Image: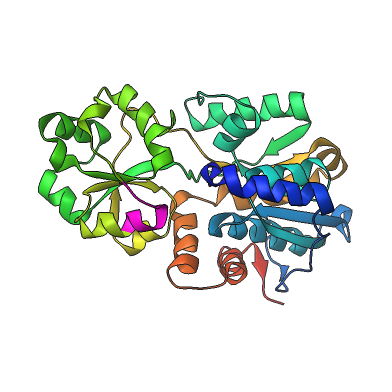
Amino acid sequence: MRKFRRILVASALATLTLASCGLQSGGALPLAVGPGSITPVPDLENVKITVGSKDYTEQVILGYLIEFALSAAGADVRDLTNIAGSNSTRDAQESGQIDITYEYTGTGWINYLGHETPVPGATAQFEAVRDEDLERNGMVWVDPAPMDNTYALAMSRQTADETGITTLSQYTDLIEADPKAASTCMESEFLVRQDGFAGMAARYGFDLARVHPNILQTGIIYEAIARGTSCRFGEVFTTDGRIIALDLLILEDDLHFFPNYNPAIVMRKDFADAHPQVAEVMAPVSAALTTAEITELNRRVDVEGEEPANVARDWLVDKGFITLP
């Protein structure tokens, strides 16, 4: 995901651009790296690999992680991160303009494969996407990461102390007892999505009519939750760095409603078959990508103003995957 909600307009325009003139072939890596625990792989030496990503912080960081890792392995990596929208990124991959990207299992299942109901459980969701996308579209999914960038409701620490709430079931009880005390900020799309608030209401058994949501833009919601003025609870994405910066607390999804959005390496089958070493290089990198780790990387970019390439390279260096030249 993150996030297919922005696809509707942005990717439609980007897809027209793709169709009319195509993407450029990609630029060189913005920073040089050396080998660490990722060592040169003879079969990848000077192999030209174009890496793509979508156009928001987390995706750009993930794209650079692929680029620096494969560069340390000896590949001739080209940078085509920052593509506008999920659909445009997928189109670029299917057409051969990019070779590899990180994509989210929930996005693959719902957006690309057209399912409305997610598969419960991270492993089961990954396996379902992996098997069906390979069979239908010749796309190979490997190396899923434990990080999960999904929907959630969050609250300030003050709200948590005042209400004693820690779970969505307790939030439901508050709605039934005192709807005004459960004031909630969200995007308009989240209100009606079946994998959003509407579906959550059905799963947790509360009446949508009892909730009077405050509809705000995504970027405003985090500050609104922290201040507690226009809402006490609000829609967030679980890996957003503002959760840390504003000391927000995530309500536990104790009935496991929200879909899993774990990123995995995605390649066309012809590319994956020709270069099986790519999956071997990326496996330990993906395994280290926990929700806490990526949230901190997002925070450094979105809150501290650091460059995504620097943040991605620093993390790989800190983990020992690569070295500075």
Instruction: Pick the quarter of the image with the C terminus.
Output: bottom right
The quarter of the displayed image where residue 271 is located: top right
The quarter of the displayed image where residue 256 is located: top left
Residue 295 lies, with reference to residue 33, above or below; the image says: above
The residue lying at 79 percent from left, 67 percent from top is: 27
**Does 216 appear in magenta?**
yes
Number of marks present in the image shown: 0
The residue lying at 76 percent from left, 29 percent from top is: 137
Q: Nearer the viewer, residue 316 or 263?
A: 263
**Does 76 appear in magenta?**
no
Can residue 143 be seen here?
Answer: yes
User: What stretch of residues is rendered in magenta?
Assistant: 215-222
Helix, strand or loop for the magenta stretch, by majority: helix
The quarter of the displayed image where residue 221 is located: bottom left
Is residue 3 rendered to the left or right of residue 114? left
Q: Nearer the viewer, residue 45 or 177?
A: 177
Q: Where's residue 243, x and y in %?
A: 35, 56
The residue lying at 38 percent from left, 27 percent from top is: 199
Q: Nearer the viewer, residue 241 or 35?
A: 241
Is residue 175 rendered to the left or right of residue 276? left
Q: Where's residue 320, x and y in %?
A: 61, 64
Instruction: Pick the quarter of the image with the N terminus.
Output: top right
